[in-house]
Amino acid sequence: MFTGIRTPNYRLLKKTLKNQLIQALDNGMTWLISGGELGTEQWGLEVGIALKADYPDLQTSLMTPFTDFGSRWQEDNQDKLSALKAQVDFTASVSQAPYQNRHSSVAICNSCSSTRTARYCCMIPK
Protein backbone atom coordinates (compact mmCIF):
# COMPACT_ATOMS: atom_id res chain seq x y z
CA MET A 1 0.00 0.00 0.00
CA PHE A 2 2.84 2.39 0.76
CA THR A 3 6.25 2.92 -0.79
CA GLY A 4 9.33 4.57 0.63
CA ILE A 5 8.87 7.91 -1.12
CA ARG A 6 10.22 10.81 0.93
CA THR A 7 8.69 14.29 1.00
CA PRO A 8 9.45 17.44 3.00
CA ASN A 9 5.73 17.98 3.71
CA TYR A 10 5.28 14.82 5.75
CA ARG A 11 2.51 16.26 7.95
CA LEU A 12 0.20 16.62 4.95
CA LEU A 13 1.18 13.17 3.76
CA LYS A 14 0.49 11.66 7.18
CA LYS A 15 -2.94 13.34 7.24
CA THR A 16 -3.67 11.88 3.82
CA LEU A 17 -2.45 8.46 4.97
CA LYS A 18 -4.72 8.70 8.00
CA ASN A 19 -7.75 9.54 5.86
CA GLN A 20 -7.01 6.68 3.46
CA LEU A 21 -6.47 4.22 6.31
CA ILE A 22 -9.71 5.28 8.03
CA GLN A 23 -11.58 4.73 4.79
CA ALA A 24 -10.00 1.28 4.39
CA LEU A 25 -10.73 0.41 8.03
CA ASP A 26 -14.34 1.49 7.65
CA ASN A 27 -14.51 -0.84 4.64
CA GLY A 28 -13.30 -3.83 6.63
CA MET A 29 -9.51 -3.71 6.51
CA THR A 30 -8.02 -5.47 9.55
CA TRP A 31 -4.29 -5.64 8.72
CA LEU A 32 -1.83 -2.90 7.80
CA ILE A 33 1.30 -4.49 6.36
CA SER A 34 4.17 -2.23 5.41
CA GLY A 35 7.90 -2.31 4.82
CA GLY A 36 10.28 -0.42 7.00
CA GLU A 37 11.74 2.04 4.53
CA LEU A 38 12.24 5.56 5.78
CA GLY A 39 9.48 7.90 4.74
CA THR A 40 6.03 6.81 3.63
CA GLU A 41 6.32 3.18 4.77
CA GLN A 42 7.26 4.12 8.33
CA TRP A 43 4.80 7.02 8.43
CA GLY A 44 2.00 4.69 7.34
CA LEU A 45 2.78 2.37 10.25
CA GLU A 46 3.00 5.29 12.68
CA VAL A 47 -0.46 6.44 11.58
CA GLY A 48 -1.81 2.89 11.80
CA ILE A 49 -0.44 2.44 15.31
CA ALA A 50 -2.09 5.72 16.37
CA LEU A 51 -5.41 4.59 14.85
CA LYS A 52 -5.46 1.41 16.95
CA ALA A 53 -7.01 3.42 19.79
CA ASP A 54 -10.13 3.95 17.66
CA TYR A 55 -9.85 0.69 15.69
CA PRO A 56 -8.83 -1.99 18.22
CA ASP A 57 -9.19 -4.80 15.67
CA LEU A 58 -6.47 -3.29 13.48
CA GLN A 59 -3.31 -5.39 13.36
CA THR A 60 -0.02 -3.85 12.19
CA SER A 61 2.91 -5.64 10.60
CA LEU A 62 6.38 -4.50 9.59
CA MET A 63 7.88 -6.77 6.94
CA THR A 64 11.52 -6.13 6.05
CA PRO A 65 13.07 -7.46 2.83
CA PHE A 66 16.06 -9.13 4.55
CA THR A 67 17.36 -9.87 8.04
CA ASP A 68 19.79 -7.00 8.54
CA PHE A 69 17.54 -4.39 6.94
CA GLY A 70 18.44 -0.90 8.17
CA SER A 71 21.77 -1.93 9.67
CA ARG A 72 23.67 0.47 7.41
CA TRP A 73 21.47 3.44 8.26
CA GLN A 74 22.45 6.31 10.52
CA GLU A 75 21.95 5.48 14.18
CA ASP A 76 18.90 7.73 14.66
CA ASN A 77 17.15 6.05 11.71
CA GLN A 78 18.04 2.61 13.08
CA ASP A 79 16.50 3.68 16.39
CA LYS A 80 13.28 4.73 14.61
CA LEU A 81 13.08 1.33 12.91
CA SER A 82 13.67 -0.48 16.21
CA ALA A 83 10.97 1.60 17.92
CA LEU A 84 8.48 0.74 15.15
CA LYS A 85 9.32 -2.96 15.40
CA ALA A 86 8.55 -2.79 19.11
CA GLN A 87 5.15 -1.19 18.50
CA VAL A 88 3.71 -3.35 15.71
CA ASP A 89 1.78 -6.57 16.26
CA PHE A 90 4.00 -8.63 13.96
CA THR A 91 7.39 -8.23 12.35
CA ALA A 92 9.44 -10.53 10.17
CA SER A 93 11.88 -10.55 7.27
CA VAL A 94 10.75 -11.78 3.88
CA SER A 95 14.20 -13.31 3.33
CA GLN A 96 16.22 -14.87 6.13
CA ALA A 97 19.43 -13.97 4.29
CA PRO A 98 21.36 -10.75 4.87
CA TYR A 99 21.49 -8.02 2.23
CA GLN A 100 23.39 -9.26 -0.83
CA ASN A 101 23.43 -6.17 -3.11
CA ARG A 102 22.05 -8.10 -6.05
CA HIS A 103 20.40 -6.26 -8.89
CA SER A 104 16.92 -7.03 -10.10
CA SER A 105 18.37 -8.50 -13.31
CA VAL A 106 19.77 -11.44 -11.34
CA ALA A 107 17.95 -14.72 -11.89
CA ILE A 108 18.70 -18.40 -11.51
CA CYS A 109 19.19 -20.16 -14.83
CA ASN A 110 17.22 -23.40 -15.14
CA SER A 111 19.92 -24.99 -17.33
CA CYS A 112 23.15 -24.23 -15.50
CA SER A 113 21.85 -23.00 -12.10
CA SER A 114 23.88 -19.84 -12.58
CA THR A 115 22.92 -16.85 -10.47
CA ARG A 116 24.71 -14.41 -12.74
CA THR A 117 22.98 -11.48 -14.35
CA ALA A 118 20.82 -12.41 -17.32
CA ARG A 119 23.34 -11.30 -19.94
CA TYR A 120 25.94 -13.78 -18.64
CA CYS A 121 23.69 -16.85 -18.51
CA CYS A 122 24.69 -19.93 -20.52
CA MET A 123 21.43 -19.73 -22.50
CA ILE A 124 22.11 -16.29 -23.97
CA PRO A 125 24.27 -16.26 -27.13
CA LYS A 126 27.61 -14.60 -26.60
Image (spheres, rainbow, N blue to C red):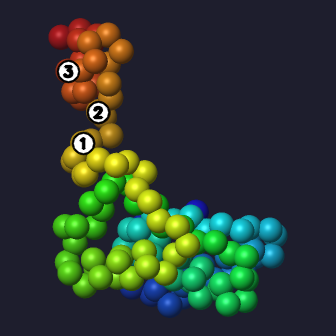
Q: Earlier in the sequence, mark 1 or mark 3?
A: 1
Amino acid type assigned to the residue bearing label 2 in the image: Val
Q: Position of residue 105 (x, y in %)?
A: 31, 34
The N terminus, quarter of image: bottom right
Nearest the camera: 28 or 1?
28
**Disc 1 to disc 3, how far (Cα)?**
14 Å
Mark 2 vs 3: CB contact within 8 A: no
Q: Quadrant of residue 4?
A: bottom left
**Which residue appears at 71% of the width and 68% of the height?**
30
In this orientation, which residue lies closer to the viewer: 85 or 102? 85
Q: Residues within 10 Å of mark 1 (few under 14, many from 20)?
A: few
Residue at the image position 81 percent from the left and 70 percent from the top: 27
Q: Nearer the viewer, mark 1 or mark 3?
A: 1
Residue 75 relative to residue 63: left or right? left
Mark found first going from the N terminus, 2 or 3? 2
Residue designated by label 2:
106
Q: Alpha-carbon distance for marks 2 and 3?
A: 10 Å
Residue under label 1, please give it: 102
Disc 3 marks a residue whose amino acid type is Tyr
Check disc 3 and report its element: helix, strand or loop: helix
Q: Secondary structure at mark 2?
A: loop
Q: Are marks 2 and 1 in contact (CB under 8 Å)?
A: yes
Q: Is residue 11 above or below residue 38?
A: below
Residue 2, position in %: x, y? 53, 66
* Residue that carries the numbered disc 3 in the rendered image: 120
Tags 1 and 3 in contact by the CB under 8 Å rule? no
The part of the image, by quadrant, that contains residue 7 is: bottom left
Residue beneath the point at 56% across and 64% down: 33
Left or right: residue 86 compared with residue 75: right
Distance from Cα at disc 2 to Cα at disc 1: 7 Å
Residue 118 percent coordinates (x, y): 28, 25
Amino acid type indicated by mark 1:
Arg
